[in-house]
Image (cartoon, coloured by chain):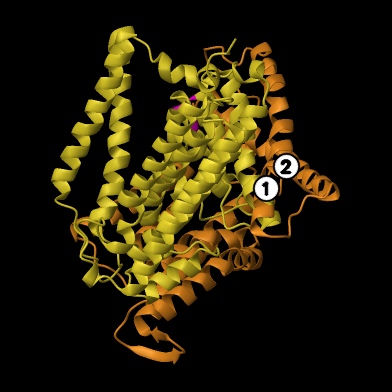
Chain colours: A yellow, B orange
Amino acid sequence: MQRIWLRGVAGIAAALAVGLVALTASGTLDATPDPATGLIAGASALAITIAIAILAGFLGYAALELLQTGRLDSIASQFGTRTLALMPIAIALNVVLGQTIGTALRMPIYLDSIGTILVGVLCGPLAGAATGILANVVWTFGLAGTPLGSPYAWPFAIVAAEIGLFAGLFGRAGFFRSRPDTPPDRLAAGAAVAVVVLAALAYLGILPAYLKGTLIDADLTTVEPFFIAVALGVAAGVAAAAVVLVVRLVRERDLGVAYVVVGGAACGVVSALIATPVAAIFFGGVTGGGTDLLVAAFQQAGSSLFEAVLQQSVISDPIDKTITFVVVFTILRSLPRRFVVRFPQGERALGEREG
Amino acid sequence: MALDAIGRPGPSLYHRLNPLTKVASAAVATLGAFLIGGYVAPALLFAGLVLPGALVARLLRRVVRLSLLVSLLISVSVALVSVLTRAGATTLFTIGPFDATLEGVDFAGRVIVRLVVAAAALTLFGLTTEPRALVADLERRGASPRLTFALAATLDAIPRMIERAVVVAAAQRARGLDTEGRLLARLRGLVPLVGPVLLSSLAEVEQRSLALDARAFGRRGPRHPVWSPPDSDRQRAVRWLLVLGLTAILAGRAVGAVPELP
């Protein structure tokens, strides 16, 4: 156990070291937009730095494991036979559900990461990341020339990898574990923590996109009233979501719902940060969906391209990922335990059987 | 759509090219169009990598039609968002509160050109390449059997899952599931729609994993594919040329040695 902790520390240290070096090399976060592209170089660098730091973290963990044991069991174990049998199903789910169910329900959400999240939770973060990447590659190259194919899916492979990674890490930490019949005192404490975390995510990760800073340090006199109104609307939305969460917790008494909502929101905020430069650089900030209206509205109100895409992403991505996390959580609850525990991370995802 | 079953020669010289050559061509055209940008570079990539192949394969009209269809929705979005809301100094016309600017038109034009070129390159690849042939070729070249299995199994799983999703959606609607009503009703419809599709698909996972174990899938050692697509030194050289050429251009742009084209 101690050796595993050491590997974790090595991974975190490697991630922090690489992140600090990369941030130092790129300079302080430059908020000046490029007049040609509208991109803010600093935010793109931050997104890339996060991705490289996470990769460095895994390499650090793997390097120490190789030194300690001479093998890479933590990686190899995530890609056993059951994972390989699940991955094609998961990728097909991403492609098919995103196209059919999303269209049938006419919802402004993507639903194209259910399979990725499922593999991440059941098989591990690397398996989840690999599923995300493969799904986007198959969507572009494997289905090219067919009605289901999308020539524009491949740049978002990095976002899909991040989603699979987060799902795997949250699954490992037990976020997708059902916690039925939680005692009222623990339920109240859990609800309070969840509400505080959601508020922190909104305060630090969502509202600054509109206010050009946190509520404490933003100079609101320089912010257009439109964006202040949007920020208020978003804050009200987050508050409403927190109320719905508390009501659901009281009704179902399953604290697992709080964990999965918080996990989904956090994953969504990070997804928005990584997806924004991809959408802005490759596709002029649009995806061909209804969310493009938001980009148009923000750009019309004075935002640069990058700002407008970020302002749209921090609304749609957390909503989409939270809903998807809850759907996967609900489905996992209904799967037979003996089926789930056969996956590499299944037992950790479900937790120990009670009684 | 795949035109030939794996193993049978294609109807044209372009169809008969090694799948990796066609992937390299599509990937270089796509990446080049997006990363180099402008109007001239994507047009040159189309003229050099897509047009000759489409002509030889006698698929030009189909490639153009499909690529325009695929890129239509996103192109309209780009046009509307960029032309009407992107800030610019030269106003062309005004519609209500929206000023259409020359800068917006130029930006939309640059994005749409690369979207169409990328769609054309990938459509040509999709129409002339059997995905299983690509997977077989990757396996022959030493790609991980796990990776090639995942790719091949995914291509098999998708059509089956489509049928399943359509049947489940129809069945649930027949049972009274509301898919047309208010947002909350539609949100509640997610699990009854996703659940049966997912659960019935997961039932296959156990059987597949047992079948893989029974066939010694995890066995180490060399594998000998029954069939793999032919390749040639000339195609190998072309692939390297394409990849190194794009890398050189991008590196040249990064250091300022290659000028930016309009």
| Residue farthest along the right direction in this orientation | B174
Q: Is residue A8 above or below residue A47?
A: above
Q: Is residue A269 left or right of residue A214?
A: right
Residue for badge 2: B192
Q: Is residue A229 left or right of residue A118?
A: left
**Badge 2: residue crowd in 10 Å (few <14, some 14–19, many ≥20):** some
Between disc 1 and disc 2, the foreground one is 1
Q: Chain of mark 2?
A: B
Relative image position of residue B208 (x, y in whole percent): 69, 22
Determine whether label 1 and label 2 are within 8 Å by CB: yes
Q: Is residue A19 above or below residue A295?
A: above
Mark 2 element type: helix
Q: Is residue B242 left or right of residue A321?
A: left
Residue for badge 1: B188
Q: Residue at x 55, y 24 (%)?
A: B145
Relative image position of residue B12 (x, y in whole percent): 65, 53
Please report the bounds of the magenta region as a residue range.
Answer: A124-128
Relative image position of residue B222 (x, y in whole percent): 53, 16
Q: Are marks 1 and 2 on the same chain?
A: yes
Looking at the image, which is closer to me, B157 or A233?
A233
Disc 1 marks a residue whose amino acid type is Arg
Report if residue A94 lies within the magenta region. no
Observer able to see residue A203: yes
Disc 2 marks a residue whose amino acid type is Pro
Q: Is residue A262 above or below residue A4?
A: below
Q: Residue at x 60, y 59 (%)?
A: B56
Looking at the image, which is closer to me, B83 or A12?
A12
